[in-house]
């Protein structure tokens, strides 16, 4: 199997030990076996184009590919290409029986991030996981497991260390992720082999959820999406076991954000809707509405998008006697403004988008460099659409500097996506240099 497989078709083929030529032959056989006696023009070159994301097979070709892999037609109707192909990731079920299994599965995925970097949970799998989270009641933690009793002092120390590690900014966390992973392994060992009271068990599960969530974000920033998904699945299982609905809602929103980032907004709507049903704090609801607005804008659903943006603004301005959950405490008017601007960009309202992004950039605190880098990319895109090339050039260089410094590959990739829009302006001073930077970054 290849060291790095970036397309579900290549992965499904590799699982069966087929070469590209083998798959083409099986597609020809599937065509001949059709009652109407079809003929297929598929060859190795066509399979290569599909696997390198250069071309999408026609509906007729997809039906023949499904025949070759023995995939039911119902799967094609339920999911878009290529997400119906066999071998897709499946989340681990929730419940105390599966919590440690989810943590161990996530740790294996984090160690093996070189393979299947494209793999994420399908829209159907995410919808099922979010529904399961919404409907299942957490089991009571057992108080007598095999092994030594876990004392309060140890958990105090683990929590204090874990809080310091997960609170580090992205620029520092890229150097400490091994410490986070090591502590997650320690906590998982205690959950699996230790003896503890229900109260201690709840604290251990919450700590595991926090560590797995942070580790998942690091993998997401490195574009290791399969490992990120498994770590967030483990975090959701641990938060569920601890009975923390707010934290679980935050993890579902992470899944949704990943889906939007990977241009699969349809997979984001259901988890965000489930999270909104079970979350009461206004700051949390504001962030969930904002992310659902982003999903709706990417789907072209203008009315739904604007409805969620209005709800996000109202919720953010609503006072609460309780502090916001940790996972959304950073949510601010700057985030609302910039993401609203990105929604307007998706919907084609360039002037409104530019104004909102500009407003948000002025409000964002200097401490949030990763967010600033992403927002700068949104600003550059809006400037390009407004044909303000020199400004777009300066902002893009600044965004690339930030993304490179903090070690966030996905942010570098986001900046690189601006390259096609700059190509027609190569005569503008500095554009050629930027194109060279993007090619080598």
Image (tube, rainbow, N blue to C red):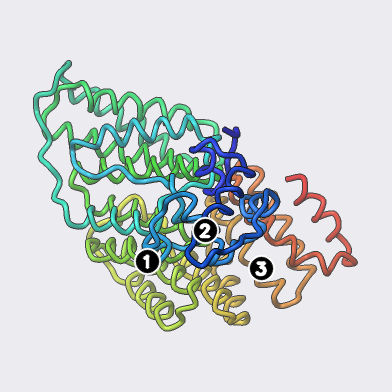
Label annotation for residue 64: 2
**Quadrant, the N terminus:** top right
The mark nearer the N terminus, 2 or 1, is: 2
**Quadrant, the C terminus:** top right
On the rendered structure, is 305 left or right of 174?
A: left
Mark 3 neighbour density, 10 Å: few (under 14) some (14–19) many (20 or more): many
Above/below status of 193 relative to 167: above
Query: Where residue 295 sits in the image (x, y, percent)?
Result: 45, 68
Q: Are marks 3 and 1 in contact (CB under 8 Å)?
A: no
Q: Nearer the viewer, residue 37 or 235?
A: 37
Q: Give me the residue at 62% from left, 44% from top.
A: 20
The mark nearer the N terminus, 3 or 1, is: 1
Disc 1: which residue: 269
Q: CA distance from mark 2 to mark 1?
A: 31 Å
Q: Are marks 2 and 1 in contact (CB under 8 Å)?
A: no
Q: Which mark is in front, 2 or 1? A: 2
Above/below status of 191 relative to 119: above
Above/below status of 87 relative to 427: above
Query: Where residue 239 sits in the image (x, y, percent)?
Result: 25, 44
Q: Nearer the viewer, residue 326 or 67?
A: 67
Judged from the image, the secondary structure of the residue bearing numbered disc 2 is helix
Judged from the image, the secondary structure of the residue bearing numbered disc 3 is helix
Q: Give me the residue at 37% from left, 72% from top.
A: 312
Judged from the image, the secondary structure of the residue bearing numbered disc 1 is helix
Q: Which mark is in front, 3 or 2? A: 2
Query: Where residue 344 sits in the image (x, y, percent)?
Result: 54, 77
Query: Where residue 176 sits in the image (x, y, percent)?
Result: 50, 31
Disc 3: which residue: 381
Q: Nearer the viewer, residue 22 or 46?
A: 22
């Amino acid at each position: 199997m290849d060291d790095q497989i970036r397309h579900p078709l290549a992965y499904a083929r590799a699982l069966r030990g087929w070469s590209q030529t083998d798959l083409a032959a099986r597609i020809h056989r599937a065509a001949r076996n059709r009652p109407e006696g079809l003929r297929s023009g598929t060859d190795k070159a066509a399979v290569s184009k599909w696997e390198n994301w250069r071309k999408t097979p026609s509906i007729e070709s997809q039906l023949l590919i499904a025949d070759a892999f023995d995939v039911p037609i119902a799967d094609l109707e339920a999911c878009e290409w290529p997400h119906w192909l066999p071998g897709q990731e499946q989340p681990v079920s929730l419940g105390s029986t599966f919590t440690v299994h989810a943590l161990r599965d996530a740790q294996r995925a984090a160690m093996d991030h070189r393979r299947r970097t494209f793999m994420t949970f399908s829209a159907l799998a995410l919808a099922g996981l979010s529904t399961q989270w919404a409907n299942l009641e957490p089991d009571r933690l057992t108080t007598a497991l095999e092994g030594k009793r876990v004392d309060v002092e140890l958990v105090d120390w683990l929590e204090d260390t874990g809080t310091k590690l997960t609170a580090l900014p992205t620029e520092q966390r890229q150097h400490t992720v091994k410490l986070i992973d090591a502590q997650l392994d320690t906590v998982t060992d205690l959950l699996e082999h230790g003896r503890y009271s229900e109260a201690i068990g709840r604290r251990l599960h919450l700590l595991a959820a926090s560590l797995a969530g942070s580790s998942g974000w690091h993998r997401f920033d490195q574009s290791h999406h399969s490992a990120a998904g498994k770590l967030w699945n483990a975090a959701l299982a641990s938060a569920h076991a601890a009975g923390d609905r707010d934290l679980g809602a935050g993890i579902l929103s992470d899944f949704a954000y990943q889906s939007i980032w990977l241009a699969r907004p349809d997979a984001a709507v259901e988890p965000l809707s489930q999270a909104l049903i079970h979350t009461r704090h206004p700051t949390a609801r504001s962030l969930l509405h904002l992310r659902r607005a982003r999903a709706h804008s990417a789907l072209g659903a203008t009315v739904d998008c604007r409805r969620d943006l209005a709800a996000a603004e109202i919720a953010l301005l609503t006072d609460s006697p309780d502090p916001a959950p940790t996972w959304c405490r950073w949510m601010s008017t700057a985030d609302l403004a910039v993401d609203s601007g990105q929604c307007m960009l998706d919907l084609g309202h360039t002037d409104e988008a530019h104004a909102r992004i500009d407003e948000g950039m002025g409000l964002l605190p200097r401490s949030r460099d990763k967010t600033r880098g992403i927002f700068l990319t949104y600003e550059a895109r809006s400037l390009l659409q407004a044909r303000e090339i020199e400004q777009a050039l300066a902002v893009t260089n600044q965004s690339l500097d930030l993304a490179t410094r903090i070690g966030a590959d996905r942010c570098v990739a986001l900046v690189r996506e601006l390259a096609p829009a700059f190509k027609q302006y190569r005569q503008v001073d500095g554009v050629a240099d930027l194109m060279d930077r993007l090619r080598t970054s």
